[in-house]
Image: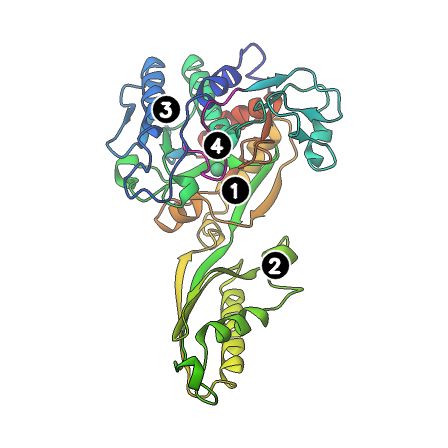
Amino acid sequence: MSDPFQSYAHSVTERFLRYVVIDTQSDPTSPTCPSTLKQKNLGRLLAAELQALGLADAHMDEHGYVYATIPATTDKAVPVICFCSHMDTSPDCSGADVKPQIVRNYRGGDIVLPGDPSQVIRPSEHPALAGQIGQDIVTSDGTTLLGADNKAGIAEIMDAAQFLLSNPAIKHGTIKILFTPDEEIGRGVDRVDLKKLGADFGYTMDGETAGNIEDETFSADGATIIINGVSAHPGFAKGKMEHAIKIASAIVDRLPKDTCSPETTEAREGFLHPVGVSGTLEQARLDFIVRDFSEQGLRQKEALLEDIVKDVMRDYPRSSYEMQVKAQYRNMKEVIDLHPEIVTYAEDAIRRAGLAPVRTSIRGGTDGSRLSFMGLPCPNIFAGEHAFHSRREWVSVGDMEKAVQTIVHLAMIWEERS
Ligand SMILES: [Zn+2]
């Protein structure tokens, strides 16, 4: 097969540089949607650019979601595929006044960021840099994050749209584009209108290393323990007082230390992680997040937590506890495995773009994990972002172009095999 990109001038990098200077940081303390109005500045620009590309239905809705349709170029009945990225950046790191820098023809070694020379991107801490010799690498100036998470994905989808629209001889089915606000604060799909979107399958373009495709996320629960102690005047408390704060502390102290915690696990291991503690003598509260790739793993960790609580409570016979577990999100693999072609087609598209596909899992959730359970099976494809949520965030031009090509090949493969 000839390379459809041979004479195509990619627009992904100029788009990326245009999008990252727009501050779109989301805010978990805001009750509105989008959580910050400034996200709409990017949404408006994207809707206008999609209109200018000729996508007549492109628009941003009142909640800040951007929708558009690339019409089919084939008579075949092809499933409708959606490509999705999020517009917001993480509240963990400033996203105002981003000044992108391009290191041309990277020669290896440390990249010192000019706006704050204490911020250094070192190959020892970023092993993926080793594969980028000769590439152009985009960073921030070191005073803010870059926003490759997830504006790299947005720029890639936009460039792929431009490519498909300027090459109408390429056969593909109907393609939907979706840009969401507030993914970084876990609310990215709260107001999405899947009926209006009308897609059968989706792909988020929000992964890390070039070639990666992720079809698994954590399954996630939250657990709360309320401890009711026994209060007494401290001057007359001997043999009477049972201190709720001390009971809570004893529980935290007995959590496994060498396993089962974020700081001692990796790959496919889950964890039990305290995220909040508050209390008085009479009552204390502990909040946990529980993470694992399987339902059974979640249950085991929750049982372990309750065993620890019961064991501690034996020393406090007149006190009591309540434990409550709430589901947060579930491993999308359960849904995606019902449609294995979603992932195998993506692997073939990655291969056609000249990369070796790597199937992997995410130690977290994505918009896709919730979309999958809402009826839109949605694995996550690499966007090329690295060291996200930090001032040392970077992305390479070559990886972004490979992601654009992966999107286009994927659209073609769905048509070929329908
Ligand atoms: Zn992201």
Q: Quadrant of residue 112?
A: top right
Say what amino acid the circle numbered 3 marks: Leu
Identify the element where label 2 is drawn.
Answer: loop
Residue sticking out furthest to the left: 62
Cα–Cα gap, marks 4 and 2: 31 Å
Where is the C terminus found, in terms of image quarters?
A: top left
On whether residue 92 falls in the magenta region, the answer is yes
* Disc 4 within 8 angstroms of ligand 1 (CB): no
Identify the element where label 1 is drawn.
Answer: helix
Q: Are marks 1 and 2 in contact (CB under 8 Å)?
A: no
In this figure, which residue is indicated by the disc labeled 3? 42
Does 277 sit left or right of 59 as displayed?
right
Say what amino acid the circle numbered 4 marks: Ser
Cα–Cα gap, marks 1 and 2: 23 Å
Disc assigned to residue 269: 2
Counting residues from the start of the chain, the first of labels 1 and 4 encountered is 4
- Bounds of the magenta segment: 88-99
Disc assigned to residue 94: 4
- How far across and how far down the image is residue 92, in percent? 49, 40
Counting residues from the start of the chain, the first of labels 1 and 3 encountered is 3
Counting residues from the start of the chain, the first of labels 4 and 2 encountered is 4
Q: Are marks 1 and 4 in contact (CB under 8 Å)?
A: no
Counting residues from the start of the chain, the first of labels 3 and 4 encountered is 3
Q: Residue at x 66, y 34 (%)?
A: 356
* Disc 2 within 8 angstroms of ligand 1 (CB): no
Please, which colouring scheme is shown?
A: rainbow
